[in-house]
């Protein structure tokens, strides 16, 4: 009988150990899911950051292009204004010299 009681005690301890192991496995799965969720969030944030950097590069490129176009127009306006002022000065001198 003693041998039969040993098996009952051993089976009882095995059952308790299996129960603890099942709880540990559930806990490990929960922690693993949390870690995967955090990792997924980090990767999502990195993708968003890369997308924002790409947009920033495009915006900076467009702004520099607009600045170059604006600079060209200012120079063109300056030259045309200079041309009008020069023609006005030449006409005044010509008229002044002709009148005398």
Image (spheres, helix red, strand yellow):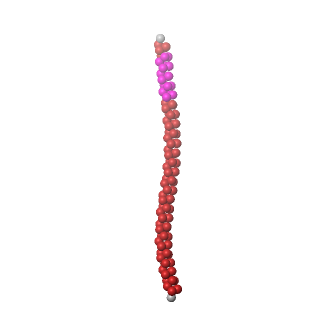
Q: Main secondary structure of the magenta part?
A: helix
Q: How many numbered markers are drawn?
A: 0
Residue 14 position within the rendered picture, expressed as x and y whole percent measured from the top left: 50, 78
Residue at the outermost top position: 100
Q: Tell me where the magenta segment starts and ends, as one range.
A: 78-94
- Residue at point 51% right, 48% down? 53
Residue 77 position within the rendered picture, expressed as x and y whole percent measured from the top left: 49, 30
Q: Is residue 84 above or below residue 28?
A: above
Q: Is residue 15 above or below residue 45?
A: below
Residue at the outermost bottom position: 1
Q: Which one is in front, 14 or 66? A: 14
Q: Which one is in front, 87 or 44? A: 44
Within the magenta stretch, is there residue 90? yes
- Residue at point 51% right, 31% down? 75
Q: Is residue 9 above or below residue 25?
A: below
- Residue at point 49% right, 49% down? 52
Q: Which one is in front, 23 or 85? A: 23
Residue 6 position within the rendered picture, expressed as x and y whole percent measured from the top left: 51, 83
Within the magenta stretch, is there residue 5? no
Q: Which one is in front, 84 or 49? A: 49
Residue 37 position within the rendered picture, expressed as x and y whole percent measured from the top left: 48, 61
- Residue at point 49% right, 28% down? 78
């Amino acid at each position: 009988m003693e041998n039969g009681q040993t098996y009952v005690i051993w089976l009882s301890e095995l059952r308790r150990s299996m129960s603890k192991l099942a709880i540990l496995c559930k806990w490990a799965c929960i922690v693993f899911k949390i870690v995967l969720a955090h990792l997924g969030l980090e990767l999502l944030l990195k993708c968003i950051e890369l997308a924002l950097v790409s947009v920033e590069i495009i915006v900076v490129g467009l702004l520099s292009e607009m600045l170059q176009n604006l600079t060209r127009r200012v120079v063109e306006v300056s030259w045309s204004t200079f041309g009008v002022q020069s023609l006005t000065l030449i006409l005044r001198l010509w008229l002044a010299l002709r009148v005398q």
